Image (tube, grey):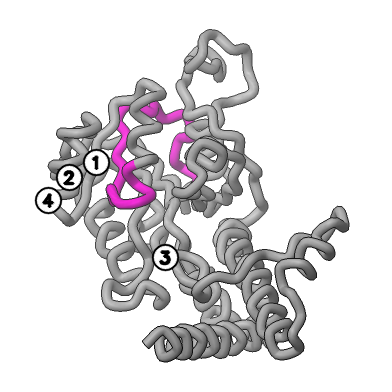
Amino acid sequence: MINHLKDDISFDKILVIGLGQLGLPVAKYVKEKGFDVYGYDNNQLTMDNAEKQHGIKKIENFRDVDVFMICISTHREDDISSPQVDGLMAITRKIAKEASNGKLVSIESTVPRGTTRKMFEILEHRFHVVHAPHRWYALEEDVHGVNQLRVIGGVCDCCLRTGIRFYNGVEHEERSDLEYYSGTKSYRSLHIPMYSVSTVELAELSKIIENADRYLQIAFAEDLYMFCKANRISFAELRDAVNTKWNVNILEPRDGIGGHCIPKDTRMFLETSEIKSKILIAAQEVDKNYRKYIEGMIKDLKQINH
């Protein structure tokens, strides 16, 4: 087992794998914190742009890397609402083949329950493996950036200790903005507050449940909107009135539940559970009906305008 691995490894050379919508902001943040950061992406143009525009150095071989931060998309290329972890497994095999034993592997990508342990098996128990799903939000990066509170879980205790030390330092005497003491050694961290959970599966579930909950909120808003239209009620006025209560926040429905995360992560939750959530299945049906409703409204408006 992994108990023979030391959890006082240094964090000198950091590699961010996947330089897309999530990975690039992560790499930039790590660089701002003074770490020696590198980037890796299957798309050569993406790597070139990251280097030219943001100073994220390229890397081909994983031999000397201390920390792997995996930010690969977990959806199919032809369907962003369908989960797929093939790319994640491929990069795990590359790490297992090229990297030195005992390094830290942190999965920030959203993954189905059980994925992190599968990666740990591919890595032959030779690495510290944690799951620290991101909560970065592109439209409000100033408020919901890379450094916001997030959940972390480890495959075992030493993995979790190592992951927390990398992200948030250790609770010892503070020496400078970046250094924390542990015994006679000082360590740098990303200064990201972390909420640790007892198992890595809980960390995996935390992310997909967050987005499944958001899916439900949007679907209810869509359902309520269609109800109001059918009964000639002002949805906007009703929403404003209801939202005056302190613990209610009816959202505003738009074009249907889209984007890279919410539909995909909701499907992840449904597909990795033996007992299917009836309320989420109903919410998917609501969204499907809402989309048809909006399409019909647009079509009617076009006919009227012509």
- Can see residue 132? no
Observer-nearest residue: 190 or 296? Answer: 296
Residue assigned mark 2: 47
Alpha-carbon neighbours of circle 1 within 10 Å: few (<14), some, or many (≥20)? many
- Range of magenta residues: 3-24
Q: Is residue 237 left or right of residue 82?
A: right
Q: Choose the circle earlier in sequence order: 4 or 1.
A: 1
Which-is-in-front pick, marks 2 and 3?
3
Quarter of the image that includes the C terminus: bottom left
In this view, which residue lies farthest toward the right? 245
Q: Choose the circle earlier in sequence order: 4 or 3.
A: 4
- Residue type highlighted by circle 4: Gln
The reply to whether the C-beta atoms of the residues labelled 1 and 2 are less than 8 Å apart is yes
Residue assigned mark 3: 260
Can you tell which quarter of the image residue 212 is in?
A: bottom right
Can you tell which quarter of the image residue 240 is in?
A: bottom right
Q: Position of residue 188 (x, y in %)?
A: 46, 22
State the separation of the CA atoms marked 3 and 1.
22 Å
- Residue type highlighted by circle 3: His
State the separation of the CA atoms marked 4 and 1.
11 Å
Observer-nearest residue: 106 or 101? Answer: 106
Q: Position of residue 62 (x, y in %)?
A: 21, 43
The reply to whether the C-beta atoms of the residues labelled 4 and 2 are less than 8 Å apart is yes
Alpha-carbon neighbours of circle 4 within 10 Å: few (<14), some, or many (≥20)? few
Q: Choose the circle earlier in sequence order: 2 or 3.
A: 2
Measuring 43% from the left and 47% from the top, which residue is drawn there? Answer: 106
Residue assigned mark 1: 39
Which-is-in-front pick, marks 1 and 2?
2
Measuring 86% from the left and 53% from the top, which residue is drawn there? Answer: 246
- Residue type highlighted by circle 2: Met
